Amino acid sequence: MLERGKLTAPAGSRLMAKRIEPVDVLVGRRVRAYRLSLGMSQTTLGEKVGVTFQQIQKYERGTNRIGSSRLKKVATVLGVGVGALFAEPESDQPGQDPLTEITSQPHAARLLKAFAAITDDKLRLALVKLAEGLQERAK
């Protein structure tokens, strides 16, 4: 029963707190990674799926679960099968997927595209060494 912004439970029942499940976080991270790889904004994805960008943010964080019909729409817009959003992580630790973790970071898709466009192995290695040097400096 909904009373002016409050959710109340019928007598004798208990409301359960909403839990964030690891699979919801994994799917959200994968949605973000695929979206970023396409250079698509949350607003654009939301418009194509029929939700607000705020809802896309919640999906990507795993705060809100994506219903099955909406998940199918999201996958279609991203150009992947639904199964790609559920792919098992390479890591042995539950909830840890290093590839998705990295590719869902801002600018990662741009960096990977630029790296892939470099055909000279020496230049690629120089870029890797530059990134590693920046990493050490940031510590």
Image (spheres, rainbow, N blue to C red):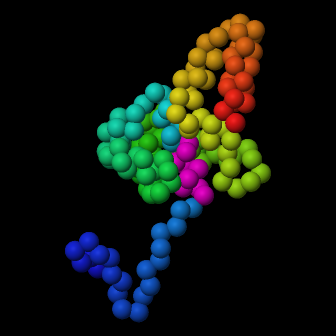
**Residue 14 in the image: x percent, y percent?**
44, 85
What residue is drawn where x is 50% and y is 40%? 32
Q: Residue furthest left?
A: 4
Magenta span: helix, strand or loop, mainly?
helix
Residue 46 appears left or right of 64: left
Which range is magenta? 22-30
As drawn, is 42 to the left or to the right of 3?
A: right
Magenta span contains residue 57: no
Q: Position of residue 18 (x, y in %)?
A: 47, 69
User: Could you say which quadrant of the image residue 6 lies in?
Assistant: bottom left
- Horizontal and vertical percent position of residue 42: 39, 38
Task: Answer with the quarter of the image where residue 139 lies.
Answer: top right
> Going 75% across and 8% down the picture, which residue do you hit?
122
Q: Is residue 55 above or below residue 109?
A: below
Q: Picture coordinates of residue 136 (x, y %)?
A: 73, 30
Is 28 in the magenta?
A: yes
Which of the 4 image quadrants contains residue 8?
A: bottom left
